[in-house]
Amino acid sequence: MTSWYDTSYRKLFFDFHSPGTTEGLASAYDAEQWASRLQATHAQAVSVFTKCGFGYSYYRKGHIRYVHPHLPEGVDMLGEQVEALHQRSMRAIGYYHTFNSEPVARDHPEWLEREVGGSPRGISVCMLGPLLREWMLPHIEEIVSLYDVDAMFFDGTYAHSPCFCPACQARFAAATGGLALPENQDDPNWPRFLRWKTGAFKDVRDMICETVHRIRPEMPVSFNYAYTPRIPELVPPGVGNLMADIFPDDQVFNGSYFSAYWAAQDKPFDVMNSAFLQWWGDWGCKPASSLQQEVATVIARGGLTWIGYQMTQAFDVAQAVLDEMGKALMFVEERESLLNEATPVRHVAVLHSTSSPDYPGQKRFHLDETSLRGAHRCLSEAMVPHHLVHEVHLLRHLAEYRAVFLPDQQFLSTELADALSAWVNEGGVVIALGRTGTLDEQMQPTGRFALENLLGVRYQGAYDQTHAYIEVIDPRLKPGTLDMPHLVEAPFTFASPVRDDVRVLAKLRKIYLRSDGRLLLRWSPVGEDSGYPAITLRHAGKGWAAFLAADVFRAYQAKNQWNLKHIIANLLDLVVPDPPVRVASPAWLDVSLMRQPTGRLIVHLVNPHGPRPVDGNNYCLEDAVPVRQISVSIRTSKRPARITLEPEGELPMWSYAGGVATVQVPEVAIHRAVVLDSGQS
């Protein structure tokens, strides 16, 4: 079921976290004037605060909230803003901070999180104790009953650290037959604790959704950073949209990365970039060009725009900041004809299983994303349209993909392994990396590959060093690479071909070790041939099955071994010689494919380039350097009725032959789309 949120392309978010000691609070507040200023930015929806990060609310109705002690007498900021926004046809999204509270710490210290020794953890509240049912859920119910907010956005509802309050100790003991909470990651019960706390927060989010929807069944509910790659969980039905305020180091890459994952989740999603230069609480401002580049990576994959900033204690934002944010929203508005009802065209999938948090050795609440980020970076720089997907999506949509990467996906269910084998037999392509398919349902090693029959290789153990080398011997994998063995810093797997039709495309070379068995330096140079392959390929039915002995995506992201990217691209070209789109460009572009019900096929081209910081500051684009003279070849069974370059509507030079339309794109400054119109209504 769709809602207004599906087409809420232009949104703004403004933090208003205010400690109780904040004087001069809201001295510049004027709801009507604020709403008029927001309207001028072309925003469709704007945040309104229901509870801030210090535990205070800025409204008068109800009885459960803590009103900020310095809120001007008679002012109801929540109600007044909602009314002013609605009068101007803008939506109001209620923001609720869940995990800190000064007044709760004062009045209910028993509700606070606790350290190992029992001391309170600042003003951090524990949502697994009595607070949730006795105060927070009734508070939320009161807000959505008394105020006409259009959506609710909750910040902080995920497991992030152990809490030793009495409630957590009692709940963990009850769930585990009397176990004590582990004090550190070395405790043998730590993995069990991680699973317990992660599950408990799933329940918290479910209860929040149920509370809201009992009063407002139609209301979209979202949770910051839940269901992200670092917390790969299935999205429950009660969640209306996905949301994360991405880290500021490189919001162009981060926007693209999150969008490549969430585009496969079948939910509207926001990837919140920010107008400030550093992080929340910085009152500088990026130029509009930087904001436009960041949002371009999101809308190109079907995402929604929500740009964030921090207000002053007076409830004000410099007009210059609003002007830059408005330019970014107008950039989106110019492209909305490309976004309406557009759905992703599936081509290459990278599996990121929801079982990953259960793999042996996982000790953190949030997964190490190095491999997945490396996969996205590698395929993006190779200009290969792709999505990062979980196993439920993959099983549902497998027939729509041409190729699937399995980067060290150690557990594969029997259902998925069988489905992949059948799909390859009908023409699909599987590329398995590292230890894929070597764990059983209890996450214990099996000593074999679940896909042994498909890959044609048998597991023989693991190489006991931190790195090794890939020596390409098949010339088809060499274009763009140096003619030398390539360092891969990642665990290697030994595997032997067990079928005559397995082709060895690259050898696995060990590393040199000194007489004391140690590395030569921090790394070691190439050593002897291991006798095992690094890359194999076999024709299976109508499709292909490839095996790489290490997770090269992890190695590419961690150490920037650029040759690995070209090896992957060459391998993909070998097994998928007729991709839906191929881009020839003097510099790589972020390429994504979307389709609209009208029959329009859209190739989004985003220019991600700009001067990268060298001193630890975050990436910020001042002036875009256009990429010029681009050729885009798009596979289409029929000659298009019309091809345009959007959003300008420019008619490019193009030709059609052999089922491929080749379009000449003069330049891409930040974003441009090639639109093929089939002529259908």
Image (cartoon, rainbow, N blue to C red):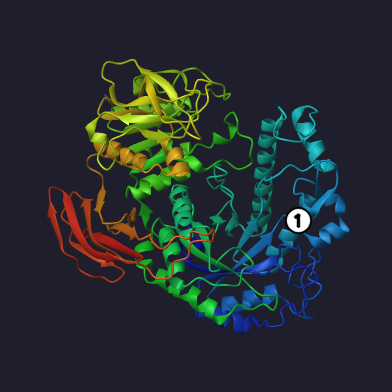
Residue at 36% x, 30% y: name it.
470
Residue at 21% x, 53% y: name it.
633
Nearer-the-camera pick, 622 or 22: 622
Q: Which x, y percent locates residue 514?
A: 49, 23
Question: Quick check: 10 left or right of 338?
Answer: right
Quadrant in which the C terminus is drawn: bottom left
Residue at 71% x, 62% y: name it.
53
Q: Which x, y percent locates residue 231?
A: 57, 44
Question: Quick check: 75 left or right of 91?
Answer: right
The quarter of the displayed image where residue 577 is located: top left
Whether 660 is drawn above or below 555: the answer is: below
Q: Decide if residue 351 is in sight here.
A: no
Residue, disc 1: 136
The quarter of the displayed image where residue 358 is located: top right
Secondary structure at badge 1 equals helix
Residue at 54% x, 72% y: name it.
285
Nearer-the-camera pick, 529 or 50: 529
